[in-house]
Image (spheres, helix red, strand yellow):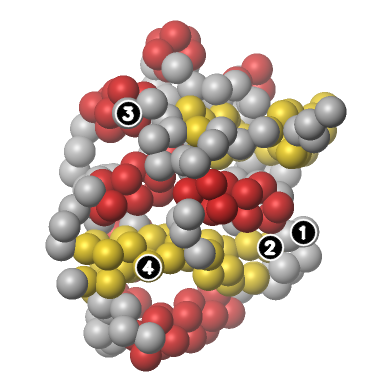
Amino acid sequence: MNKVMVSFSSGKDSMLTLHRLINNPDYSVEYLLITLSEEFKRSSIHGIREELIDLQAQSLGFPIKKVYLPKNCTNNIYEEKMAQVMSEAENAGMTHVAFGDIFLEDIRSYREEKLASGHIKPIFPLWGTNTTRLMDEFLELGYQTMITTIDPNKVPRKFLGKVIDQKLLDSFPKEVDPCGENGEFHTFVIDGPLFSKPLPVKTTNNQVDEEFYTYQDLIIQKSN
């Protein structure tokens, strides 16, 4: 049995990657691998609070391997940390790492190059699939995901915090990829067939503008 860790962002593409692998008898998913800001305790790019990442993994029933990245993390530091993670995983018997990339050749080539010297092999379960079909599959399976990050040059701010459905997809600007594969938007999955229960998540009034992205803050909704 091939033992695989899933490079996990907490968003739709990595969730669909996980879903496909769980239903593939050739692989045994051992854990989720995620990078977080050491300073802010939020996931990289998606900006999700660590406590929400923990809650999501708990509902999914998988352990998480967290990699904390320092402030102003250089590419060299990132690669050193990931090389250490891969070495530890290899020693623990891991055979593969799965990525949710769909069609960006440069990103796939980078991952393959960095893993070429070791024994852990990269796999890309979503690779080459039409992104409209992928989003249709994701929604038909019953997953729900919230838009947490946008490139404000490509996606209007009004989409932040929205749960994606077909009506919302139809209202996207026509140049936006349905999966946001060109970095137009990122998401946080809050429910679906792999979840033991939906995540009690709500938006706040806090939307943060940074150099390339605008982030919607999410918090756990406390029960009364």
Identified at 56% across, 33% down, the residue is: 198
Identified at 48% across, 14% down, the residue is: 168
- The residue singled out by tag 1 in the image is 40
Q: In this view, does 136 lie above or below 122?
A: above
Q: Is residue 196 above or below residue 36?
A: above
Question: Tag 4: residue type?
Answer: Glu
Mark closest to the chain's N terminus, 2 or 4: 4
Question: Tag 3: residue type?
Answer: Leu
Identified at 19% across, 43% down, the residue is: 128
Nearer to the camera, 152 or 14? 14
Which quadrant is the C terminus positioned in?
top right
Nearer to the camera, 159 or 174? 159
Mark closest to the chain's N terminus, 1 or 4: 4
Mark closest to the chain's N terminus, 3 or 4: 4
Secondary element under disc 4, as helix, strand or loop, is strand
Q: Distance between the residues labelled 1 and 2?
A: 5 Å
Q: Distance between the residues labelled 3 and 4?
A: 22 Å
| Residue found at the very far bottom of the displayed protein | 91
Q: Distance between the residues labelled 3 and 1?
A: 33 Å
State the image coordinates of residue 172 (x, y, percent, origin top left). 46, 16
Q: How far apart are marks 2 and 4 (CA)?
A: 23 Å
- The residue singled out by tag 4 in the image is 30
Asked if the residue under mark 4 is in contact with the one under mark 2, i.e. CB atoms within 8 Å, the reply is: no
- The residue singled out by tag 3 in the image is 141
Asked if the residue under mark 4 is in contact with the one under mark 3, i.e. CB atoms within 8 Å, the reply is: no
Question: Tag 1: residue type?
Answer: Phe
Residue 138 visible (yes or no): yes
Secondary element under disc 2, as helix, strand or loop, is strand
Q: Is residue 12 left or right of residue 136?
A: right
